Image (cartoon, helix red, strand yellow):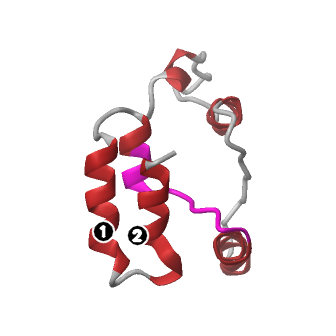
Amino acid sequence: MCGEPTRSPLDGRGELEITDLNRHFVDLGRGSAWSDTGTHESLMDAALFVQVLAERQGIRLARIEEVSYRMGFINAEQLTLLGKEFVATSALGYGRSLMDLAIT
């Protein structure tokens, strides 16, 4: 897990509660949504949610390149190069969106 949630108290089994992790993501400020994907139907609902965000609003989720950039593991030049690699092959403008992020 990532840094901050490990500061939360552990439950009786010595584990973190999922609500503690969710609280951490809400505090990150980018927005969050929780989907219980315990059934085939709820998993499809979650997938449709992600698809709608990408197609209708241009919001990208779980981009490892963006996370690496925001955490300082790569710089804007490296992010731009990664974006250029995706431009020719990615659907929905993935590469372009990485390049745009690098110039903001």
Going 28% across and 61% down the picture, which residue do you hit?
A: 82
Image location (x, y in percent) of residue 17: 64, 33
Front-most of residues 88 and 59: 88
In the image, taking residue 38 as reference, residue 85 lies left or right, namely: left
Label 2 sits on a secondary structure element that is helix
Image location (x, y in percent) of residue 62: 50, 56
Q: Quadrant of the N terminus?
A: top left
The residue tagged 1 is 84
| Amino acid at the residue labelled 2 | Gly
| Amino acid at the residue labelled 1 | Lys
Label 1 sits on a secondary structure element that is helix
Per the image, is 49 magenta? Answer: no
Q: Circles 1 and 2: CB distance less than 8 Å?
A: yes
Residue 51, relative to residue 21: is it above or below? Answer: below
Image location (x, y in percent) of residue 12: 61, 22
Per the image, is 66 magenta? Answer: yes
The residue tagged 2 is 95
Going 32% across and 56% down the picture, which residue do you hit?
A: 80
Front-most of residues 64 and 86: 86
Front-most of residues 58 and 35: 58
Residue 61's tag is: none
The Cα–Cα distance between marks 1 and 2, rounded to whole angstroms, is 6 Å
Q: Residues within 10 Å of mark 2 (few under 14, many from 20)?
A: many
Residue 63, relative to residue 16: is it above or below? Answer: below
Q: Earlier in the sequence, mark 1 or mark 2?
A: 1
Single out the residue that lies furthest toward the front: 103
In the image, taking residue 79 as reference, residue 100 lies left or right, namely: right
Going 57% across and 29% down the picture, which residue do you hit?
A: 16
Span colored in magenta: 57-67
Residue 44, relative to residue 103: is it above or below? Answer: below
Residue 29: which quarter of the image? top right
